[in-house]
């Protein structure tokens, strides 16, 4: 077991809730920089509840937990935005602002997280679009992009604040196989090159086999190695 001080995520004896009900009991989890971790399991097995606990959307019901230096058992509401700045979150349904260009979608996030200098903001937008291969799409609106391109924008958005951890909730769920492979290649490269840890929820075992990582299974109210 790794030393806790080296882990970005540490859960010990954690009970994970979904509203009132406990869906996972006694979870022990360590995620270190550069780790690529899959969370798999049937619908309703606790995958999404675990993710919501890690970003402090759901309270930790029992046990201890730390994510990116924040104690989940003691975190105050005013601290939650600062935790989430250390985490890049990628959703299945992109959640882009449809009336704004790609560049404006990214600029909105930077301004929301209190970036100030225009030169630094423009440079960071250019960097993240380059990382996902969308350098020429900055002035397009989401409806002018393919599903795969929209998900690349979502990944670029998640990278803006140089997160220590990326949490991806079914990021390939709405994409065809070839496009999903491209998205997975981007996530794996980010993890390998920058040392960013990735926790990815997926139902697609084909992707898990094609892009190997550590696989954890939510089953029978437990989180265990698959």
Image (tube, rainbow, N blue to C red):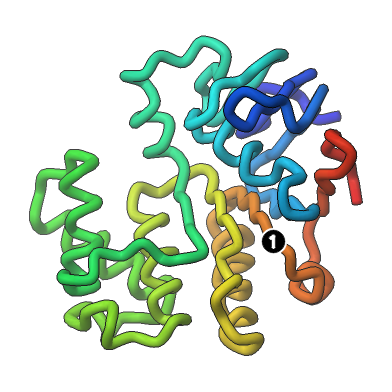
Seen as rendered, the residue at the extreme front is: 20
Dot 1 lies on which element? Answer: loop
Q: Is residue 189 above or below residue 87?
A: below
Where residue 67 appears, x then y in whole percent? 57, 29
Q: Is residue 94 above or below residue 81?
A: below
In the image: residue 158, left or right of residue 73: left
Count of numbered badges drawn on the protein: 1
Which residue in the protein does label 1 denote?
Answer: 202
Where residue 101 appears, x then y in whole percent? 18, 74
In the image: residue 207, left or right of residue 18: right
Q: Residue at x 16, y 71 (%)?
A: 99
Q: Residue at x 45, y 66 (%)?
A: 93
Where residue 214 appears, x then y in whole percent? 81, 53
Q: Residue at x 47, y 42 (%)?
A: 87
Q: Quadrant of residue 114?
A: top left
Which of 122 and 219 lies nearest the eye of the viewer? Answer: 219
Q: Residue at x 32, y 67 (%)?
A: 127
Which of 26 and 199 lies nearest the eye of the viewer? Answer: 26
Where residue 121 appears, x then y in whole percent? 18, 56
């Amino acid at each position: 077991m790794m030393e806790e001080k080296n882990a970005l995520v540490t859960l010990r004896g954690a009970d994970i809730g979904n509203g009132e009900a406990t869906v996972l009991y006694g979870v022990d989890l360590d995620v270190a920089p550069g780790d690529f971790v899959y969370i798999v399991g049937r619908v309703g097995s606790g995958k999404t509840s675990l993710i919501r606990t890690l970003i402090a959307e759901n309270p930790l019901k029992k046990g201890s937990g730390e994510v990116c230096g924040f104690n989940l058992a003691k975190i105050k509401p005013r601290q939650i935005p600062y935790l989430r700045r250390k985490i890049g979150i990628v959703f299945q349904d992109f959640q882009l602002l449809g009336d704004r260009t790609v560049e404006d979608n990214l600029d909105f996030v930077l301004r929301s997280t209190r970036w100030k200098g225009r030169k630094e903001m423009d440079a960071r937008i250019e960097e993240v679009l380059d990382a996902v291969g969308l350098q020429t799409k900055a002035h397009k609106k989401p409806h002018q992009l393919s599903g795969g391109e929209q998900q690349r924008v979502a990944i670029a958005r998640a990278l803006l604040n140089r997160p220590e951890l990326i949490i991806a909730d079914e990021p390939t769920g709405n994409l065809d196989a070839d496009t999903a492979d491209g998205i997975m290649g981007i996530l794996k490269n980010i993890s390998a090159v920058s040392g960013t840890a990735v926790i990815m929820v997926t139902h697609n075992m084909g992707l898990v086999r094609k892009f190997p990582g550590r696989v954890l299974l939510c089953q029978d109210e437990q989180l265990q190695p698959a």
